[in-house]
Image: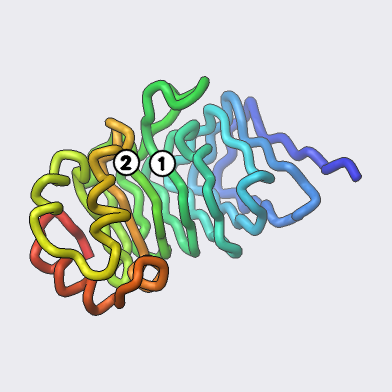
């Protein structure tokens, strides 16, 4: 069965509500598209959503089913946007050399305080302009540069071996990394409380 292809491109939309919720459709938000003060309702998997050179300004994203491993945010410009819902393994911002179209990527003044993020990275940006979700999410700021400091303490379970020991291997443009404590604790043989006790010792971790 062929998927229905829905294209948004070569226009500017303002104060619109876009419902990208049909699991049988592929949504292409592409070249020369600007969305301003729009609400986008997302209820499809990452493989159904394609971004290429689109500009989102003061938009709200309502993620109705967990959006997993969606790297294509790095092909979009996000300014003054708000995210709600669950996102995991997603990358945002400017990632030089990632793939064709990376030069369109940017993120600033965005609010993730109502989102649940896990394994989400923010690339080539100024994290001080972003609002990250609070505990049980937690965010490493400037993780590559701070990696030696973070390796200097004992982390619970295998969190240190799996996460902290590999921070320096993140892409060079990584400016922040957000994790969700209950998921990380379950996978890495610890508890959220044990993680929090160590996290609170660092000013480079926002929670």
Mark 1 closeness class: few <14, some 14–19, many ≥20 residues within 10 Å: many
Q: Which mark is residue 108?
A: 2
How far apart are the two marked residues, 2 and 1, measured between alpha carbons?
Answer: 10 Å
Q: Mark 1 or mark 2, which is nearer the start of the sequence?
A: 1
Q: Quadrant of the N terminus?
A: top right
Where residue 157 appears, as percent x and y from the top left, is: 27, 69
Left or right relative to 18: residue 165: left
Residue in front for this viewpoint, 22 or 99: 99
Residue at image mark 1: 92
At 20% from the left and 49% from the top, the residue drawn is: 141
User: How far across and how far down the image is residue 146, in percent?
Assistant: 13, 45
Residue 76 drawn above or below residue 141: above
Quarter-of-image position of residue 198:
bottom left
- Please identify the residue farthest to the right as the structure is shown: 1
Which quadrant holds the C terminus?
bottom left
Q: Residue at position x 23%, y 40% from top?
A: 168
Q: Is residue 114 left or right of residue 21?
A: left
The structure residue drawn at horizontal position 42% and vertical position 55%, both measured from the top left corner, is 82
């Amino acid at each position: 069965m062929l998927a229905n292809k829905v294209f948004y491109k070569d226009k500017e939309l303002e104060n619109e509500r876009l419902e990208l919720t049909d699991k049988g459709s592929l949504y292409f938000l592409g070249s020369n598209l600007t969305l301003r003060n729009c609400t986008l309702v997302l209820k499809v998997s990452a493989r159904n959503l394609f971004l290429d050179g689109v500009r989102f300004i003061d938009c709200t994203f309502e993620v109705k089913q967990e959006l997993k491993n969606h790297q294509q945010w790095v092909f979009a410009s996000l300014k003054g946007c708000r995210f709600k819902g669950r996102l995991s393994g997603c990358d945002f911002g400017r990632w030089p050399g990632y793939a064709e179209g990376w030069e369109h990527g940017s993120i600033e003044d965005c609010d993730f305080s109502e989102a649940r993020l896990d394994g989400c990275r923010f690339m080539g940006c100024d994290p001080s302009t972003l609002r990250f979700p609070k505990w049980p999410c937690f965010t490493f700021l400037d993780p590559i540069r701070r990696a030696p400091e973070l390796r200097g303490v004992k982390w619970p379970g295998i969190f240190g071996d799996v996460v902290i020991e590999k921070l320096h291997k993140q892409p060079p443009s990584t400016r922040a990394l957000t994790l969700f404590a209950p998921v990380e604790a379950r996978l890495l043989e610890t508890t959220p409380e044990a993680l929090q006790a160590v996290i609170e010792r660092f000013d480079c971790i926002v929670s």
